[in-house]
Image (cartoon, helix red, strand yellow):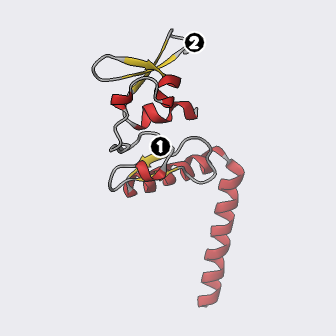
Amino acid sequence: MNPDLKECRQRGYEITYDNIYRTGTAYCEFPDGNRCPLRDFNDGTCGAEYMIEDYCVKEGEPVWDSDKCCKGLWAYLPPLMTGQARCLSKPGIISTTLLMLYYLIIANPLLSIAIVLIMGYIIFRLIKRTK
């Protein structure tokens, strides 16, 4: 994700745009309805009162700094994936990884066949060894 979104998103604020096509100026919108252009918020010329130091990124939200995840969460990006890490719990990490592996195998029939053949060979060798 665009690193310009970092401060606004990690602090839990909304990002809005001039129009529905997300072109033009991006704004960091605060809970009280005030907003600042994203660049001004990032460089501290607008919204300094919203730049609270103590914050953590909630589960499922994108994170740039791994130490900003809330307690009990870890920044995680599945292996072989590109994109933005998200703060996840250990069960979330496990289920995300398993789901990614499931789709990787289903989406690649040759890999599925190779896995079946390898497992068949291992079972064959185990049976042969026990005789």
Residue at horizontal 59%, vertical 41%? 83
* Viewer can see residue 14: yes
Q: Earlier in the sequence, mark 1 or mark 2?
A: 2
Horizontal side of residue 61 vs 131, given as left or right? left
The disc label shown at residue 129, or none: none
Q: Amino acid at mark 2?
A: Gly
Q: Nearer the viewer, residue 22 or 111?
A: 22
Q: Secondary structure at mark 1?
A: loop
Question: Which residue is pictured at 38% across the width and 43% down the height?
Answer: 57
Q: Quadrant of the C terminus?
A: bottom right
**In the image, is 31 to the left or to the right of 78?**
left
Disc 2: which residue: 24
Q: Give the camera-side residue of 129 and 24.
A: 24
**Numbered-mark total:** 2
On the image, the x and y values in percent for residue 78 come to 55, 51
Element at badge 2? loop
The quadrant in which residue 21 appears is top right
Q: Where the N terminus falls, by quadrant?
A: top right
> For mark 1, what is the residue?
63
Please rate how many residues cluster around mark 2, counting C-alpha atoms within 10 Å: few if below 14, some from 14 to 19, many from 20. Answer: few
Q: Position of residue 73 (x, y in %)?
A: 38, 53
Residue lying at the far top of the rendered structure = 19
Residue for point 61% across, 48% down: 104
